Image (cartoon, rainbow, N blue to C red):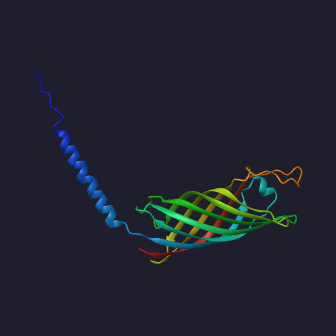
Amino acid sequence: MRRVVSCKGLLPLILLWFSIATSTHAQVESESWSLKTQLGIWFGPVTPVPGSALSNVLSTSLGGGMFMRVNIPTNWLRFEVGGSYSYYTAKTLLRLHSIPVYGALSYTLPINLPLSFQIKAGAGGNFLRNWPDGSRNWLPLGYGGFEASFPAGRLINIGVRADYYFVYEKWLSAPANYPGYVVYNGNFFNFGLMVNFNLGS
């Protein structure tokens, strides 16, 4: 006759082990985590995404911006806010001023290298002003980004970053005084050299 082993006696042991493991992990995480604030700037070329509707009108130009981020209670995930300024020209008299601002979550890829790689996603708003007609508006945007950097000492990181902005504009009505005017969504891309400062730990 086979003996049947009951699992009821193992359940308290499993729960005890899980409780100890969870508390130990939380203790290690809390000891290794500390608030780190970074403030950075970037400068580089900005352009409508090739193949998009605005790429046939606007030219590649230069832009720059700044950002700040803090690590929310894990060293792999950070919250970033940023803004930039871009000025686009065209073959016609058209000029476009663009000021996107965003908030995003930045995830550091767990790769054991001197370089640090981050991918980012978020949303925000984009202030656009056309010249010479003077039209201006705040438009919603979606944001995605990638960053690679390395430490240049304890206080400074140097790297490159790429940002993509999707400006949702199609919900707007075409101006009544411009017959045949078509509203397009904006797709912008920038690639810049970046320096960020580690303000605290």
Indicate the quadrant where residue 63 lies.
bottom right
Estimate the x, y position of residue 129 in percent, counting from the top left. 77, 65
Percent x, y of residue 57: 82, 59
Residue 83: name its quadrant. Answer: bottom right
Seen at 89% across and 51% down, the residue is 179
Q: Nearer the viewer, residue 197 or 126?
A: 126
Count all numbered tags in the image, as a single digit.
0
Image quadrant where one finds the N terminus: top left
Residue located 47% across and 58% down the image = 109
Q: Residue furthest left?
A: 1
Q: Residue at x 31, y 66 (%)?
A: 31
- Which residue occupies the foreground of this view, 54 or 82? 82
Q: Position of residue 84 (x, y in %)?
A: 65, 69
81 and 58: which is toward the camera: 81
Q: Is residue 142 left or right of residue 184?
A: left
Q: Residue lying farthest top?
A: 1
Using residue 173 as the reference point, say whether residue 11 is left or right of it: left
| Outermost front residue | 176
Residue 138 horizontal side relative to residue 93, left or right: left
